[in-house]
Amino acid sequence: MPGTRNSGLLALGGIALAALLALIGHVEVNEDLSPWSLTVSDYAVSDRGGVIDVAMVVLALATAALLPALRRAGATRRVGLLLLAWIGGLLLAAVVPTNEPGLPMDAAAYVHRYASVVAFLALPVGGWLLAGRLSHPAARWVRGLALTSLVLAATMVWSAYPGDRMLIGLVERVLILTEVTLIAFLAAAVARSAAGRATALPGGAARRPGGHDSRRDVAPDDAAAPLTPARGA
């Protein structure tokens, strides 16, 4: 299915670009900022409208490019809504900035915070539910990444409140890395499984002995076949 494979590859390209932009954003900001004690949002507000904000938008768009392929692969409506919450949270957090480090939180900062919280929680829950559509080894990896993300999110909440922001920047960056790896894994699974189906036999469709084209016998439900990257990877 070329459309499905292209969606996966487009998403992977967007994820790679977002990661590169985020890295550039950390290098170009004020050297007095500490990645251990300050969040990515603190870096972004110091360079408002800069590459970190752009990286968040690119990551949201990369996930959006993946949604049609996931639906064709059988993702449930609940998974789709959770991924939309991840996309919406990223976009809202990019558009509405937090406050400058050291200043009291205003209304915009609270919107930014809770949009980020929604995004951080929605993706791993959606990934956990989607794991049921994957083959066993892939499902184990997705569930592991999802569970790690939820543990890190809880750790970040602890750091933000009773932990007096201890190492909050480090925890958040590990959380973001884990969640970006999760969405990249799903994009790769989509691309590989689609490529595996398309190249199983010449022409992308099996032919039975005697020249009979099995495409005539494919049921409509085959369009929602489970994602099984182990077969195509």
Image (spheres, rainbow, N blue to C red):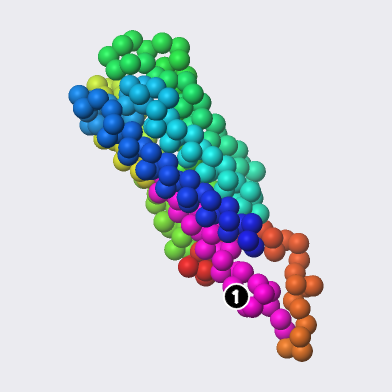
Report the residue that reaches farthest toward the bottom: 210
**Residue 113: image location, x then y, percent:** 42, 23
**Badge 1, how many Cα within 10 Å: few under 14, some, many 20+?**
few
* Depth check, front residue: 121 or 100: 100
- Residue 231 visible in image: yes
Q: Main secondary structure of the magenta part?
A: helix
How many marks the image carries: the answer is 1
- Pick the front one: 197 or 95: 95
Residue that numbered label 1 is attached to: 200
Can you say which quadrant of the picture contains the N terminus? bottom right
**What residue lies at 46% left-to-right and 60% top-to-bottom?**
138
**Image height check: is 207 above or below 151?**
below
Q: Is residue 207 magenta?
A: yes
The type of residue carrying mark 1 is Ala
Q: Position of residue 41 (x, y in %)?
A: 36, 26
Q: Residue at x 77, y 89 (%)?
A: 210
Where residue 34 appears, as percent x and y from the top left, is 22, 28
Seen in the image, is 131 located left or right of residue 160? right
> Which residue occupies 39% across, 19% down?
98
Residue 144 at what x, y percent from top left? 39, 51
Q: Nearer the viewer, residue 188 or 47?
A: 47
Q: Which residue sits at x=21%, y=27%?
A: 31
Above or below, 31 against 187 in this view is above
- The range drawn in magenta is 179-208
Q: Is residue 204 magenta?
A: yes
**Quick check: 213 above or below 210?**
above
